[in-house]
Image (cartoon, rainbow, N blue to C red):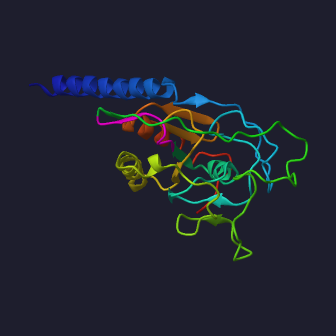
């Protein structure tokens, strides 16, 4: 083969390669982001969320506590006041409700209906003194005045008891499957949620994805899209 022919072939291959890269980049940039967009309702710090009504369940923005939850698997329900602050720092929260029917590996597990605790009407005073309802007031003991977050090893006091369905083998298997995502992403929280209207919900700041079954591919896409992309950049 003549040198000129080789040059032409190499040039054509190079051009096709560049066109392919450009086509892939354009396709990826135009691909819709996973989840549903939820309006941003602010990020002020308060110590009591009794009178605050959020615009999604679980919430994806709004007034929250000055203390946040760090990565890991939590064995108890955490107040939205802590979790929203984590979302602000670019965390992704996976909430699960084992009182809902969910699916793992094509096996369905029927679970009873969950009970709910809902926020009251919005009030002008976000630090209301009435805090009889659980999970509304920041209750963690600040042993260190510089403490700004907690971990699964030193969580807030347990405020509500989880139903027995959360101790079932099926639920434990679900949590184990969800925990596998912690190997690849640092800012990730897995937490039980009683008033969730779906078996699984994945949230980031301003985004939510609810799932009726354990769809690990969808969860992976959601985490990859929003991990460490909250409105407040932090070094942790």
Furthest toward the right, the residue is 124
> For this rendering, which residue is in front, 193 or 38?
193
Q: Where is residue 60 shown, x and y percent of the image?
A: 65, 40
Name which residue lies at 78% across and 49% down: 49
**The image quarter in which residue 197 lies:** top right
Magenta region includes residue 99: yes
> For this rendering, which residue is in front, 152 or 13?
152
Magenta region includes residue 103: yes
Name which residue lies at 50% across and 23% down: 30
**The image quarter in which residue 107 lies:** top left
Q: Where is residue 158 shown, x and y percent of the image?
A: 61, 61
Q: Where is residue 151 shown, x and y percent of the image?
A: 56, 65
Task: Look at the picture and state if 42 lies above or below 65.
Answer: above
- Name the quadrant of the N terminus: top left
Q: Where is residue 38 shown, x and y percent of the image?
A: 66, 31
Task: Look at the picture and state if 186 lies above or below 105.
Answer: below
**Apparent side of residue 102 relative to residue 143 in the rendered image (left or right):** left
**Apparent side of residue 170 relative to residue 4 in the rendered image (left or right):** right
**Apparent side of residue 120 relative to residue 157 in the rendered image (left or right):** right
Name which residue lies at 20% across and 24% down: 9
**Apparent side of residue 144 relative to residue 215 in the rendered image (left or right):** right
> For this rendering, which residue is in front, 52 or 131?
131
The stretch in magenta equals 96-105
Task: Identify the main secondary structure in magenta.
Answer: loop
Furthest toward the left, the residue is 1
Q: How many marks?
A: 0
- Name the quadrant of the C terminus: bottom right
Name which residue lies at 34% across and 25% down: 20
């Amino acid at each position: 083969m003549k040198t000129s022919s080789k040059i032409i072939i190499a040039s054509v291959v190079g051009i096709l390669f560049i066109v392919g890269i450009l086509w892939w980049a354009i396709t990826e940039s135009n691909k819709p982001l996973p989840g549903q967009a939820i309006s941003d309702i602010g990020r002020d710090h308060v110590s009591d969320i009794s009178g605050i009504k959020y615009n999604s369940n679980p919430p994806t923005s709004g007034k929250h506590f000055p203390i946040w939850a760090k990565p890991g698997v939590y064995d108890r329900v955490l107040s939205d006041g802590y979790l929203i602050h984590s979302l602000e720092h670019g965390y992704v929260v996976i909430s699960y409700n084992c009182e809902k029917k969910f699916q793992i590996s094509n096996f369905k597990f029927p679970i009873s209906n969950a009970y709910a605790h809902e926020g009251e009407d919005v009030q002008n005073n976000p630090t209301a003194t009435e805090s009889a309802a659980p999970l509304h007031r920041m209750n963690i003991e600040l042993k260190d005045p510089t403490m700004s977050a907690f971990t699964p090893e030193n969580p807030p006091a347990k405020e509500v008891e989880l139903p027995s369905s959360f101790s079932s083998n099926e639920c434990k298997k679900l949590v184990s499957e969800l925990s596998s995502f912690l190997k690849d992403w640092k800012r990730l929280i897995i937490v039980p949620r009683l008033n969730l209207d779906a078996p699984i919900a994945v949230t980031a700041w301003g985004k939510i994805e609810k799932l009726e079954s354990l769809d690990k591919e969808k969860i992976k896409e959601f985490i990859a899209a929003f991990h460490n992309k909250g409105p407040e950049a932090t070094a942790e």
